[in-house]
Amino acid sequence: MTFKPTQSAALAIALLGLAAPAFAQEGLCGGTGSKGQWIGGDEASSDIATAENYLEQMALVLGGNEYVALFSLSQATDVRIEAAGRGAGDPIIDLLDNSGTAIISDDDSGGDAASRAETYLEAGTYCMALRSYDGGPMTAFVRIGRTEQAPLTDGISTGSGEGDAASGSCETAVPMGTIGDTVASSADETPYWSFTLDTPMSVSITAENETADPVLTLYDANSTYISENDDFDGLNARLDVTETLAPGTYCVGIAALNDTTLPITVSLTQYDPEVALLGLYARGEAAPPLDGSIAFTNLGTLASRLREDVQATGAVTWYTVDIADSSLVLVEAIAAGNSDPWLVVYDDLGRKIGENDDYAGALDSMVIGRVQGGTYIIGVRQAGENQGFVRLLIERYIRAQ
């Protein structure tokens, strides 16, 4: 598929995932917005609820960092958020509310490796963070608009309004029970499940089998689209519906991007914000607070070079390092044996300096950032189900006098 920007598109380029200071918005989206750009060029032009047409930017992501687009809603609106890479680019998008809480993450729901998510949002300010699936350089088009406006991507499910739908419909949904229940079936055998809520509730729905690569779509009793997710945790899918759902019957569509014959385990639980936050910490999608509630290893002050061996697992192991003054810092996670490290670096306020997986065509990971003096947070985990040691290397370079 070929994507072309329109003349009305607001085009901007984010080198190394860092927005120009003129566009930075301190404090938005839990600090993520500090490196973002308004999708319409400025705050006044970025209200999706009143925009005459969708708004679009072009993003260049390098060095394993991310690009952040900011937008606002003056009133509650059904919105569509999309990103389509050029060439072999494979974008992943995360939608964050103004507190920095993740609302939706998506990888391939736009079709052809493009990302797409549709959801109902209350009035407020939001951030869409874009990164490359493999951590490599990527150019992509980003489009944010209302669901009645023209989409950028084809979509892969009825939840996106286009593309190939699973066989059957919500009318054929199989009851899966209620809160706390778990069922398992392939997307071919059971493309739709249903559940009933007796009281108002926020829910979490998971679909697990990475080999199948499931996609979740949630509908109400009238088959009206509510939300969808692909690749929340690895290739597994998860929907955290943070708004309160009214009592009634709901439908869950299950699709598989890889193998539709494999069983997919679907679970329904009540949404727990504390559990969701701990999950963000475990996956490295947010920096834990430095209050002792999450375990850290303090590596001390970085003079020139530090080395630490990590027995890395699928959950992030966290470190802190102190830097005396302005420096260029290189953080590298070097694979050992059957190891595939993933790396992320934050400042002490939780603002992401960068993340990376598979740097320069190898399994090693690297983040490079120009930083000020202070405490920095480093997270290391294994990508996928790999296990083994990771050698963490941190180097500091200062300007020659």
Image (cartoon, rainbow, N blue to C red):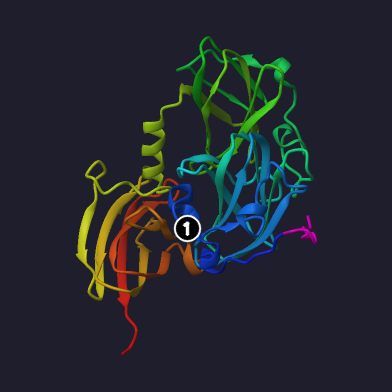
Going 33% across and 46% down the picture, which residue do you hit? 288
Determine the main secondary structure of the stretch shown in magenta.
loop
Q: Indicate yes or no whether the magenta region holds residue 6.
A: yes
Task: Give whichever of 270, 14 is nearer the camera.
Answer: 14
Q: Residue at left 41%, top 27%?
A: 272
Amino acid, disc 1: Ser
Q: Is residue 262 left or right of residue 371?
A: right
Whole-percent x, y for residue 280 in the image: 41, 42
Does residue 72 show up?
A: yes
Instruction: Write the start and end of the magenta stretch as one range.
Output: 1-9
Residue 144 percent across, percent down from the top left:
68, 48
Q: Is residue 57 above or below residue 149?
A: below
Q: Which residue is mark 1?
A: 34
Residue at x 65% of width, y 51% of height? 46
Whether residue 263 sits left or right of residue 346 in the image: it is: right
Quadrant (top left, top right, bottom left, bottom right) of the C terminus: bottom left
As helix, strand or loop, the secondary structure at mark 1 comes to helix
